[in-house]
Image (cartoon, grey):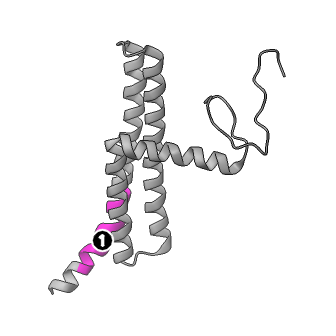
Amino acid sequence: MSPGAPNPTPKNKVYDRQLSWQVAHSLWASFRYATQGIRYAFITQRNFRIHVLIGSIALGLGLALNLEAVKMAVIALTIGLVLALELINTAIESVVDLTVEQQYHDLAKIAKDCAAGAVLIGALASLIVALSLLIPPLLIRLTSLLG
């Protein structure tokens, strides 16, 4: 250990994450930190909540239409991709804001716009996948109910 470096947290001591650069002492702590990140995004990011809602609707519709497991898996994976991209976007925006300290910078704008663009591309791809898998059985179900 280098001089001035803090002592690692003992394994039997309750872990108090005072310094964000410290490494999680256990797998359970890693899951807890990840859950905190997801919760933070859900509470603070409107678009994350919108993606969760639309994803839930898509999954619910897939279940109601009795889609095959592979199709449900594809829908779930695309939803997961969009949510993961939204979390990465939130992380990038936070780091950029921390770096530029609430001042405008062209490179900060580029970083934030590109991260948001990645989410948009993922969301559009997810929409195409969901519609291509959900619309045909939905139309069949509706025509059988009406006809």
In magenta stretch: residue 4: no
| Residue 24 x/y as whole percent | 69, 40
Q: Is residue 139 magenta?
A: yes
Label 1's element?
A: helix
**Place of residue 43 in the rendered image (x, y in percent of width and height, measured from the top left):** 38, 45
Mark 1 lies on residue:
136
- Write the start and end of the magenta stretch as one range: 129-141
Going by the numbered disc 1, the residue's amino acid type is Pro
What is the residue that sits farthest to the right in this orientation?
1
Q: Residue at x 41, y 18 (%)?
A: 108
Query: Is 18 positioned to the left or the right of 107 in the image?
Result: right
Q: Is residue 137 left or right of residue 32?
A: left
Q: Quadrant of residue 33?
A: top right
Q: Hey, which quadrant is residue 102 in on the image?
A: top left
Query: Residue lying furthest left in this view?
Result: 146
- From the image, give the main secondary structure of the stretch colored magenta: helix
Residue 134, given in percent of the width and then of the height, sits at 33, 67
Count all numbered tags in the image, as a single digit.
1
- Residue located 48% across and 46% down the image: 38
Q: Quadrant of residue 1?
A: top right
When the figure is inspected, residue 143 is found, relative to residue 44, above or below; the finding is: below
